[in-house]
Every structure is written in structure tokens, then in C-alpha cells.
Image: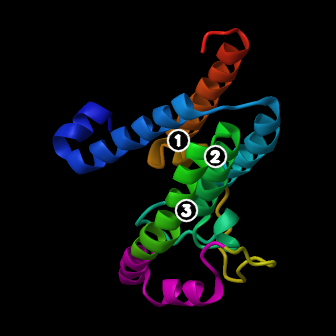
Amino acid sequence: MGLLRKLRTRPVEALKIAGVWGFGLLLACLSRPCPLSFAWGVPLILVGLVIRSWAAGHLRRNEQLATSGPYAYLRDPLYLGRLFLLCGVAVVANNTVTYALFAVGLIIFFLNYMPRKLKKETARLEKCFGEEYTEYHRHVRSLIPRLRPYPKRSTQRWSFGIFRTENREQWFILGAITLIGLMALKWWGVQEGWF
């Protein structure tokens, strides 16, 4: 669903997406990246993108309980991937203001966003999958991975179709690459005397 169509049909969601892009542009403008900040931040971003990509190829929303791939080790790999990504972006940005924004973002993430999302998702998944989800929830933590996979995990394999069509994770990856590209351009522009 395109952003303009979403603006007409689901305006709150479209405004959230626009807000995320606006926040990303603000971070890029405020950033003071350097080679060291890229060396430390980009690996964190890559870990986040790998976790999210792995999870997005296993998640069939509302069709079956995701217990394969990373879901065999933790319930919320998409959130863990997002957390790594945010940490990496803050490190690459390398600015006191962006670190402060990141700290505020972490507080919001852990004290508001995660509890609210987990409560809502737990209720929805219990309604959809009943005892199957209750048992999974009892054995698999949210953001701290298990050392051994969930014994009743699914054997579903990673699917590019699910990744691309159902979860549209390619747009998240494109956004992350765009943000890092903008910060790299900012660093290069500073070296060239543009800023």
C-alpha cells in the first residue's frame, strides 16, 4: 500500500511513517559522523537489519504462529532488530543532540512503546492461537534469546515472498540504507567544506 493511498485510508499510520522519515532526516542533518562512528555504528545497523530480515521471512501475520527461524529463540526479533538499528544509527550520528534524542527514544521504547505493543499483541495472539501461543509465550522471552530453540518450533523455512510481499521489509532496509547514505554524504560534505 503506497503512502498516498495509506494517507487516504489510514491517515494515522501514514502520518507515523512520514514522522519516522522526518525524524530520520533530522538525525541526518544533526549528525556529525566520522570514520570511527561509522566503524562502530554500521555493524550494529547490519546486525539489526539481518535480525529483522531473518524474522520478516518467517512471519505470516494472523495465519500461523511464528515459531521458526529467530522466533524459535525469542518472541520479538523485529523489535530486537529495531533496537540494534537505533543503537547503530545513534553511534553513526555521533552528536550530543542525537545521543540525547536516542536516550529519549530508548526511554519511550522501553517504558511506553514495548509494554503497550506487547500487551496488545499478546491479547491478539492469544485470541488467534489460544493455548499454542500461551505455551510459546511461557517458554520464549521477548527480547532476550533462548540458548536452545523452542522445542515445538515450526520447521517453516525462510521465504523471500513472505519477506517482500507480506512484511515488505525491503522498505525498512531501504530507509536504513538511505539514512546511512545521507550521513555518509554529510561526512563527505564536511570533508569537502560544504558544511
Q: Quadrant of residue 39?
A: top right
Q: Secondary structure at mark 1?
A: helix
Q: Secondary structure at mark 3?
A: helix
Q: Secondary structure at mark 2?
A: helix
Quarter that holds the C terminus: top right
Q: Nearer the viewer, residue 12 or 75?
A: 12
114 w.r.t. 1: above or below: below
The answer to whether residue 53 shows anywhere in this view is: no
- Residue topped by disc 2: 90
Q: Position of residue 145 (x, y in %)?
A: 72, 74
The mark nearer the N terminus, 1 or 3, is 3
44 w.r.t. 65: above or below: above
Judged left or right of residue 146, residue 6 is: left
The mark nearer the N terminus, 2 or 3, is 2
Quarter that holds the N terminus: top left
Q: Please name the residue shown 67% across and 76% down the image.
A: 153
- Residue topped by disc 3: 106
- Residue topped by disc 1: 172
